[in-house]
Amino acid sequence: MTDKDRPILETRSLGKRFSIGTRFSAEGKRTVHAVDNVSLTVRRGETVGLVGESGCGKSTLARCLVRLYDISDGELLFEGDDITSKSLAELRPLRRRLQMVFQDPSASLNPRRRVGDLVAEPLRIHGKLSSREITARVAELFDLVGLLPDHVMRYPHEFSGGQRQRVGIARAIALNPDLVVLDEPVSALDVSVQAQIVNLLADLQEKLQLTYIFIAHDLSVVRQVSTRIAVMYLGSIVEEGPAAEVFAAPAHPYSQALISAVPVVETTPSGTRQRIILTGDVPSPLKPPSGCRFHPRCPIAADRCRTERPELREYRPGRKAACHFATV
Amino acid sequence: MILSVRDLSVSFRTNDGLVRAIDGVSFDLEESEILGVVGESGSGKTVSLLAVMGLITDPNATIEGSIRYKGRELVGLPPRELRRLRGNEIAMIFQDPMTALTPVYTIGWQIAEQIRAHRNISKAKALERVEELLAEVNFPNPHEAMSRYPHQLSGGMRQRAVIAMALSCNPALLVADEPTTALDVTVQAGILDLVRKLRATHKSAVVFITHDMGVVSELADRVMVMYAGRVVERGSRMELFSDPRHPYTRALLGSIPPLTGEKPCRLPAIPGSPPSLLRLPQGCAFGPRCPAHYEPCVTGKPDLGSGTHAVACFRVAQA
């Protein structure tokens, strides 16, 4: 196996449990399976898009992937190296190569510090650079993300949302990471600014040979940036495959409903697009339904779905779905 | 004509100077018509609707122009009179349903209270009506839902409860400010369906504010695009989406990644960001970001003009 094909990140039956409540609360101590049995392979240079409704566990999964959360079950491998239970000290050198960009740039940037300082921080912590070298590197980073050199002396509140997100990106790429996990990086931005950031991310990926894991609830943005996508429902992956194929012909009924629900600009008289409207809400992960977790909302659910939970299986090279009746 | 707004301007005195949140906005709304108002944050779409509702109570605000509801002037109407209209004939739905619901009372109690504030009926009658309303907005089990507290409902269900509350007095005008923005697409699809259905059954006119062009194109009969406090383009849904004329409308539509078909290598993004209302550029506010920018754009603000498909752009006017 050459270095190119080797997965940069791999999860094997990864799970994350949270316990909520105390033994004194009404229902007692309970466990939520926020992420359940996720096996995902990320190859070098690709962008994997994670989509799903709120509460489906995509952000929890993202945080597990960079070990911001401790992993409850399964394994997490970075370049074939098991990092599931590495200590914080052992993880430190890896942090340089595994970075994260958050949704709300104003919450992830310290309002009392100048942005130049904020971008220099990772360099000070990890690098062995002199202060002159750091200044030069910060200037270079500002240029890369499209900020002006004199912006270094400003505070986060002096920037617009788009510029703040550029600062967040500059911080994430400061140490030349290999993998960047982007958790809803454009969701808080205006449409006209969103496109700029999407383009910037694409440019940086090419220039710096980055691998992305891209989380967003806006499916058209995910389609634009991703090479592969994974659709999550209630903590598990229900469909996975090349982005273009999944969007053109989703196999899982949930993916079909999700994609059909996206409002698109139509210039034809209304009513040309078929829409699947799901009934009910996402069930609580505290009491997941029996069998296939999607069955209470599924338009094609049968008896088998109520009892037997479908495995995520590869029914065609590269395309996986967890459904007894996947449209192949 | 339900609503007729003429030359509406709202400005706020702030420590940093006068902010013109909206500047010369005019529009009409017919019975059972859905008007979509699109724009980015700070474009003035919410402020113009708050003005219509008479909800701008900031002592530093100045409201100019005219807002006529069924021929009656609303600007300068005493708060008592306005309160009689609001919630009764004019109802509003906000982005976050929790701003309209109190966490300490049940859904049924809150909606019944709203009905009894405007109608002289008994509590039992009001509660009966609540159950009907909750059924109408597709609560699977309306009777049980009445005894629920807001925190026991999901986001989509809360928004349905707020819609039920807004509809409780059969409003002639429903104002919805980004009601689906905080919801998932699957839930959003259900709510949009509901709004369409209600327009048909209640004959309410709807003003629907959103930043999502897709939502507007699915729902609205007519569309108004706003930028930096002014209306830049106005037209029917078909006119606006099949023949967008203002450079901003075109650019905005272009910067949305497509969901089907060929994937562009790069998205045609609009450079820069929306201007601060404190430091508006001279002339046309979109000028500095506009690809078709030329000399006259700096000298004056283009007028929207009249007609069904109106565009505020010197280039378009010239062509």
Image (spheres, coloured by chain):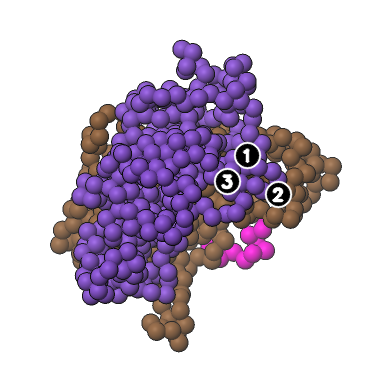
Chain colours: A brown, B purple
Residue reaching furthest to the bottom? A24
Return the chain for callout 2: B
Does residue A249 appear to the left or right of B92 in the view shown?
Answer: left
Among the two numbered marks 1 and 3 on one chain, the one whose residue lies closer to the N terminus = 3
Q: Is residue B99 above or below residue A323?
A: below
* Residue where numbered disc 2 is placed: B15
Q: In the image shown, does B208 or A153 lie closer to the viewer?
A: B208
Q: Is residue A214 above or below residue A292?
A: above
Q: Is residue A22 above or below residue B246?
A: below
Q: Residue at x 40, y 70 (%)?
A: B151
Q: Residue at x 40, y 30 (%)?
A: B234
Q: Residue at x 70, y 45 (%)?
A: B16
* Residue where numbered disc 3 is placed: B62
Q: Position of residue B141 (x, y in %)?
A: 22, 68
Q: Describe the element under mark 1 as helix, strand or loop.
A: loop
Q: Which residues are magenta?
A: A78-93
Residue type, mark 1 in image: Ser
Among the two numbered marks 2 and 1 on one chain, the one whose residue lies closer to the N terminus = 2
Q: CA distance from mark 2 to mark 3?
A: 15 Å
* Residue where numbered disc 1 is placed: B276
Q: Position of residue A84 (x, y in %)?
A: 53, 62
Residue reaching furthest to the left? A303
Question: Label 1: few (<14), some or many (≥20) within 10 Å?
Answer: some
